[in-house]
Amino acid sequence: MATLQITRSFYSVQVLPILVSVTVFFVKAVIKINRTIRPDRDLKFFKSRKKNFFPPNENSLGVFIEEIGLTAEWNSPVYKEILNSPEYLLGEYDQDCYILSDLEPIHLGSTIDRDHFIPRKRFKIFLVSVYGRLGVKKVYTGDPVAFANELKIYARLSGKKINIPAILDVNFDRFSITFSYIRGQTLRERLHDIGAVISDHDIEKNPELSKLPHENRWLIQTENKYESLYSIIDPQFVENLFDEIKKIHDSDIYINDVKYGNIIIEAQSNKPFLIDFEESRDLRGFGRFVKKILKDHETDLFNGIFFTKKTI
C-alpha cells in the first residue's frame, strides 16, 4: 500500500506536469501547422457562407453613437453622415486601449491625445460606427492565418449564448473583422486604475519597468494580489466568467489567452465578456484524453490568476 501511494504521489508530482506540458506543446504545434497551410481554403469557405456563420449575437449588447455624445444637436450634418455610413472611423486604439479621436465630443473614459499615443505592436484596432452602431474593427494586416482562425472560432461559438462580441462586418479583402462594441473596461484597465498592474505608458515613463518579463506585465504587481483583484470584482463575477469559459470548452475550443486584458466588465450588467480569439484552438479531431488535458491546463491557469480552485 505504501509503495502504491508513493507511486501515485510520484506520478502526480513528477510525471503528470511533464505529460501535460508535452501534450499542450504538441497539440499547439499540430494546430499551428494546420492553421498555416489552410487559411486560403478556410477564408474561401467562410466568404461563401458569411451570413450563415455570423448571425447576430443576442448576448452582445448594442451600443449606439448617441451614447458617446454624437447626436444631431452636436453636429447635424456629420451625425446624419455617420448614421448613413456602413463604416465611419471614430478613433484608433493604442497599445493600452486608450482611444485617439478627432471627434471632440466622444464621451469615453479612456481617451488620449496624439502626443501620448503608443501604436499597437500587432494588429491595429479602430473604433468605428456601422450605421450608427458602435463597433471595434481589428485589422489583421499581413496575418491571414490569425484572421482565418478568429473567424473559425467565431463560427464555432456563434449562436451558443456565450458572452462574446457579435460580428458586425467582415472584410475578406482587407483582412478585418468589426465586432460590436462592449461598454465597459477590461479587467486589466480596472486593475491599472488602482495601480495594481503596469501598462506600456507606465514603462514609457519609467524605463526601469521594462526589465520585468513581458508575460509578468499582465499580472498583478501589488503585495496583496487577492485583495487588489477582489476590490474590483466579486466571487459571483468569477463564477459567471468561469461559466462562460466552460461553455467555450464545451464547444471544443481551447481559448489559449485567458488574461485580464481579454475580459471586459460590461458597465451596465457587470457581466464578463471575453474577447480576442485569434490564438484559440479548435480541438475537434483530438481525442477525449488530449481535450481533457488542455481544458484542465487552461482551468489551472484560470485558478492562478483568479485565486480559485475550479475543476472541470
Image: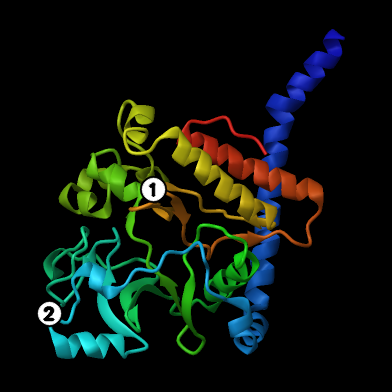
Q: Is residue 62 left or right of residue 192?
A: right
Q: Is residue 22 visible?
A: no
Instruction: Give neighbour class at mark 1: few <14, some 14-19, many 20+ (Cα, 10 Å).
Output: few
Query: Hey, which residue is sitting farthest front in the picture?
Result: 73
Question: Label 2 is placed on what type of residue?
Answer: Glu
- Classify residue 109 by image quadrant: bottom left
Q: Secondary structure at mark 1?
A: loop
Q: Is residue 81 left or right of residue 239?
A: left
Q: Position of residue 156 (x, y in %)?
A: 65, 67
Position of residue 19 relative to residue 30, above or below, is above
Check contact, mark 2 vs mark 1: CB within 8 A: no
* Image mark for residue 270: 1
Q: Position of residue 181 (x, y in %)?
A: 37, 67
Q: Quadrant of the N terminus?
A: top right
Looking at the image, which is closer to me, 256 or 230?
Answer: 230
Q: Position of residue 28 (x, y in %)?
A: 65, 57
Residue at (65%, 52%) from the top-left corner? 249
* Image mark for residue 73: 2
Position of residue 224 relative to residue 34, above or below, is above
Instruction: Give neighbour class at mark 2: few <14, some 14-19, many 20+ (Cα, 10 Å).
Output: few
Question: Label 1 is placed on what type of residue?
Answer: Asn
Residue at (23%, 66%) from the top-left corner? 99
Please say which color scheme the image uses.
rainbow
Looking at the image, which is closer to me, 211 or 113?
Answer: 113
- Classify residue 86 by image quadrant: bottom left
Q: Position of residue 102 (x, y in %)?
A: 15, 77
Residue at (28%, 38%) from the top-left corner? 196
Looking at the image, which is closer to me, 258 or 246?
Answer: 246
Q: Secondary structure at mark 2?
A: loop
Q: Earlier in the sequence, mark 2 or mark 1?
A: 2
Looking at the image, which is closer to me, 274 or 57?
Answer: 57
